[in-house]
Image (tube, rainbow, N blue to C red):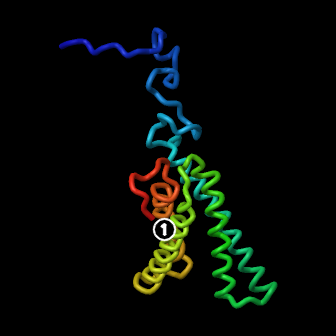
Amino acid sequence: MADAPEADLGGAEDVSKVGLSGMKGVPKAGFGGTEGAPKIGLGAPIVAQFVKFGIVGVSNTLLSLVVYAVLLKGFGVWYLAASAIGFAVGTVNGFLWNRRWTFRDHVGDALTPVRWFVVQGGGLLANLGLVFLFVHDVGLDELLGQACATAIVVVFTFLANRAWTFRMRPAADPVL
């Protein structure tokens, strides 16, 4: 049987002197740059982006609730109008933070905000449909149904926003 070719250890005699991050072709782990980074694992760019997307989502939820409560209790605004305004404020907050922080390396254009609002609108409709399904058809409690719907929708809105709204390279054909 033939011997396997020796690996290039970057001039060192053995791996223990170099460490994996010092070897040629082995990317460094962590939340840093995305160039050459692995596609899976805790240091992967998609994982870091998903964590940031979640942090922004929590801030959106808190902001929406504060706006809702202030309008409802402080100004006597009708609860559905207060909810819609709170949702709109949270959506704008989410767009701004995700554009500047979560997906800061994206290729932006004039349609980026339109794509964001399309994805968020689709997420809202999917969320409402899933909550209805979980509560009325499956028989879950309203809060548990909302939690299940949110867990599903956040993954899909993240993936849609990552692939379409905040894509990293321009699309071949500009499409909404």
Disc 1 target residue = 153
- Indicate the position of residue 29 as horizontal and vertical percent values: 53, 34
Residue drawn at point x = 50 percent, y = 70 percent: 118
Residue drawn at point x = 46 percent, y = 17 percent: 15
- Indicate the position of residue 140 as horizontal and vertical percent values: 47, 80
Against 163, residue 86 (above or below) is below
Mark 1 crowdedness (10 Å alpha carbons): few <14, some 14-19, many ≥20: many
Q: Which quadrant does the N terminus fall into?
A: top left
Against 107, residue 34 (above or below) is above
Q: Amino acid at mark 1?
A: Val
In the image, 76: left or right of 127?
Answer: right
Residue 7 seen? yes
Against 58, residue 17 (above or below) is above
Dot 1 falls on a residue whose secondary structure is helix
Which residue is situated farthest in the right direction here? 74
- Indicate the position of residue 54 as horizontal and vertical percent values: 59, 58
Residue drawn at point x = 52 percent, y = 73 percent: 121
Q: Nearer the viewer, residue 114 or 98?
A: 114
- Indicate the position of residue 92 as horizontal and vertical percent values: 65, 67
Residue 148 seen? no
Residue drawn at point x = 20 percent, y = 12 percent: 2
- Quarter location, residue 67: bottom right
Q: Which quadrant does the C terminus fall into?
A: bottom left
